[in-house]
């Protein structure tokens, strides 16, 4: 009977623990790799959305009889301005991938391309979504640095490199 137990096939507890530890290490490496990919994906989406909005603004201005930008980004898709022949330049306002918001905040003062993020933030209300200056046609991701909404990005430095004019 003792002889049969020694010949039985299977893994020892030590062997199983070693395999579990190795799998845990591999899982930690993979998870860390994909966590960074999520931010990169959101940044790529943000960049594409900004390009789409900015292109639509330029097309709107070119079609405007007065050669002006729309008063609000809603005019790009609602077609409420009679100054423009075509009514729809954008299907809808794209979603900000970081804050998951389509809200557009008007700039309280004209944006200056030479300003740093802190100065620009002071000219925008709210947090998340988009900020739009109808006088200059400048639009940026609204990465309002003092936004402390739970679950939202507190480090808002991601928006700076995509908000250059």
Image (cartoon, rainbow, N blue to C red):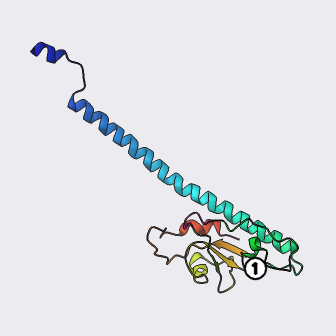
Report x, y in % for residue 82. 85, 80
| Magenta-span inclusion, residue 1 | no
In which image quadrant can residue 81 be found? Answer: bottom right
Quadrant of the snapshot with the N terminus: top left
Q: Main secondary structure of the magenta part?
A: loop
The percent position of residue 102, horizontal first and vertical second, equals 62, 70
Residue underneath mark 1: 136
Relative to 26, 3 lies left or right: left
- Asked if 55 appears above or below 134 in the picture, the reply is above
Q: Residue at x 47, y 48 (%)?
A: 33
Q: Is residue 80 left or right of residue 46?
A: right
Closer to us: 156 or 87: 87
Look at 63% across and 62% down and name the residue there: 46
Where, by quadrant of the figure, is residue 126 drawn?
A: bottom right
Q: Is residue 99 magenta?
A: yes
* Magenta residue span: 95-100
């Amino acid at each position: 009977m003792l002889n049969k137990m020694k010949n039985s096939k299977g893994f020892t507890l030590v062997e199983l623990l070693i395999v579990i530890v190795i799998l845990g290490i591999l899982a930690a490496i993979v998870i860390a790799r994909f966590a960074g990919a999520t931010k990169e994906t959101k940044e790529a989406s943000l960049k594409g959305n900004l390009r789409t909005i900015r292109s639509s603004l330029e097309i709107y201005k070119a079609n405007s009889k007065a050669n002006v930008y729309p008063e609000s980004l809603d005019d790009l898709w609602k077609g409420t301005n009679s100054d423009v022949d075509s009514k729809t330049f954008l299907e809808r306002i794209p979603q900000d991938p970081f804050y998951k918001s389509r809200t557009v905040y008007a700039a309280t003062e004209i944006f200056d391309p030479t300003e740093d993020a802190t100065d620009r933030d002071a000219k925008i209300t709210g947090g998340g979504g988009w900020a739009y200056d109808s006088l200059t046609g400048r639009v940026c991701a609204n990465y309002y640095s003092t936004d402390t909404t739970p679950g939202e990005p507190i480090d808002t430095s991601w928006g700076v490199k995509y908000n250059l004019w």
